[in-house]
Image (spheres, rainbow, N blue to C red):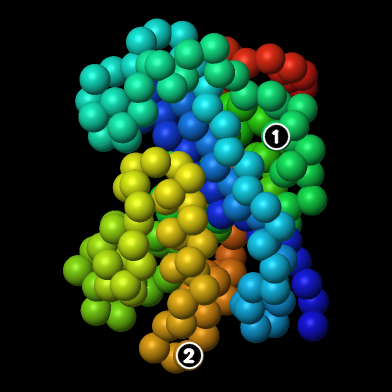
Amino acid sequence: MTIATGAVVDIETTGLSPATHEIIEISIIKFLFHQDSGRVIEELGEYHAFNEPSFPLPSFIANLTGITDGMLKNKTFDLTELRTYCFDIDYFIAHNASFDRSFLIELMPELTERKWYCSMRNIKWKEYGYANKKLNTLLHGHGIHNVHAHRADSDTRSTFELLQKHNPDGSPYLLEMLSKKPMRKPQHKKTYYPKSKNVPFS
């Protein structure tokens, strides 16, 4: 069997646009899996970090995530560490991946060239009887407890667990998702300069 390295990714941000808003939290769970069966072999670890934005956190983001300015104070992303962690990842996965990717490729432009998959769009959730594709709806339907919704570390952990569950045909959702084509590469990219240390932009 062919073994590959996957990663489930989630971020929290100050808003919806990578052109005007910033990432405040990143979580990435890296794992090995069999490409033929979609079976996870081993979890390789988790990257987690906070970043203090250029302006105070909007109140609606603080209320949604539970993240406070105090939690972010003096925190920055170490891009050397993050790039090293991401170097050997074959597949990047996120729930509503177009959002996460749009921010992350501003932080690390080289991720534009990597294979991205969306666990929200590339699995037939509605055909399986779920009312919608929202993460918390799907987690509830599978009996998965999300300790803190809208926090990157908790959402990443829950999505990782969800992907290891099986669809009605008996295949892991991970396998179903990766049987589709990866997301198309974005056509245009604006430059986003985060408040970070060790920022070797190319």
The quarter in which the C terminus is drawn is top right
Amino acid type at image mark 2:
Gly
* Left or right of 128 on screen, residue 21: right
* Left or right of 111 on screen, residue 75: left
Determine the residue positioned at 24% across, 20% down: 59
Residue at the spot of label 2: 170
Q: Helix, strand, or loop for circle 2? A: loop
The quarter in which the N terminus is drawn is bottom right
Residue 145 at x, y percent in the picture: 34, 62
Residue 41 at x, y percent in the picture: 70, 73
Disc 2 versus disc 1: distance between alpha carbons?
Answer: 35 Å
Residue 130 at x, y percent in the picture: 24, 73
Residue 25 at x, y percent in the picture: 49, 32
Determine the residue positioned at 48% across, 45% down: 153
Residue 148: mark in rendering: none
Q: How busy is the neighbourhood of tag 1: few (under 14 within 10 Å), some, or many (20 plus)?
A: some
Residue 68 found in image quarter: top left
Residue 71 found in image quarter: top left
Amino acid type at image mark 1:
Leu
In the image, 117 versus 39, the foreground residue is: 39
Residue at the spot of label 1: 82
Q: How busy is the neighbourhood of tag 2: few (under 14 within 10 Å), some, or many (20 plus)?
A: few
